Image (cartoon, helix red, strand yellow):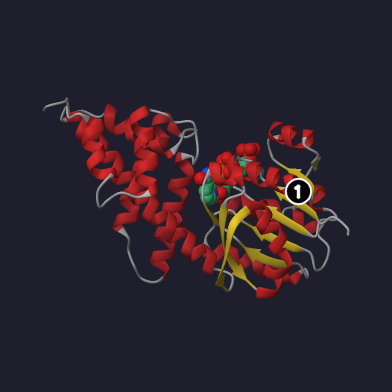
Amino acid sequence: MTTMKVAVLGLGIMGSGMARQLLNADFEVAVWNRSAEKAAPLAKAGARIGSTPADAAQGASVVVAMLADDTVSRAVWTGEDGAFAAMDEGAIAIDSSTLTGGWVAQLAALAEARGIRFLEAPVTGSRDQAAQGALRFLVGGGGEVLAAARPVFEAMGSTVVHLGPVGSGATVKLANNFLCGVQAASLSEAVALFEKRGLDVEQAMSILTDGAPASPLLKAVSRRMLDRAYDPHFLVPLMGKDLGYAEQALAEVGIVSAIAAAARQRFVEADAAGHGTQDIASIVEPLRAADGAPGS
Ligand code: NAP
């Protein structure tokens, strides 16, 4: 049996874990990242480092991208040294980044024009799930393409959900992060309220985490806010980006989302206050620093 060749483009918090899971599953893996130092640990584990996206994608039957946003995705797939320039006809391109439905549709068309098969597959789960091969893939695209790529998804994730045609994954992923972002934003305001009122914050928070508002996100992110533990699981600017994309998706169907816009503002403010390389839990910091003494 020949080993399937897989390329991973983008070795950030998520892509690094995904590439490592593919190596653990004995795929022949090539990687590329803008900042080359992030590829070094994977090279030690057996990955070939590509000098460009095209170089990494050369000869791969499946190429997976995990990149910041639409602009980066466009450059890495379709640029001069982009992956499409090197991919064979019939090879499969998978973009797992959180992207807009509009860009994903364009990307699918550009792939098709080159005879490249395409799936969008944004994920739920975060840094720990990526490192453990426990992501959930929200797939949009053809069922036959998904069947061919399934071993790759199964190495990186615990669940693969086929939601429908290209664009379905982006819609569900953006709704997912819309709800997560709104919850994190409202949580930051509640934590700041408790602190400014001089309450026993652990006790006050336990009412929320044991009560109706409780969710995995509320529990995990409130812990990090209280501990001031901002080592990134999910970066502040990326949640800001996702709330902007969710706002855009809602606007496309005629819904003006003041809720997404207000939540996004918390992430924009935190980024501007210097928390851009920290976890989303750090959005509470500008509120802590704002006027309003405890007990006032
Ligand atoms: P990250 O650690 O910031 O990684 C972003 C990746 O994009 C890195 O490989 C980065 O390269 C690359 N990149 C950024 N700007 C670039 C540019 N101008 N040119 C080329 N490459 C560029 O973020 P992440 O958490 O892994 O997220 C990746 C994607 O997954 C995003 O779309 C995010 O919304 C989504 N996502 C994240 C999570 C999470 O919890 N972290 C969960 C689900 C989905 P460098 O290393 O050189 O900066």
Residue type of the residue flagged with mark 1:
Pro
- Residue farthest right in this picture: 1
The picture places residue 145, in percent across and down from the top left corner, at 70, 70
- Badge 1: how crowded within 10 Å, few (<14), some, or many (20+)? many
- Which residue position is annotated with label 1? 53
Q: Is residue 87 above or below residue 112?
A: above
- Residue at the spot x=33%, y=30% of the render? 226
Left or right of 167? Residue 21 is: right
Residue 70 visible (yes or no)? yes
Q: Where, quadrant-wise, is the N terminus in this rendering?
A: bottom right
Q: Residue 198, located in which quarter of the rendered image?
A: top left
Q: Residue at x 22, y 33 (%)?
A: 203
For this rendering, which residue is in front, 235 or 34?
235
> Quarter holding the C terminus?
top left
Where is residue 19, by image quadrant? Answer: top right
**Residue 178, placed above or below residue 131:** below
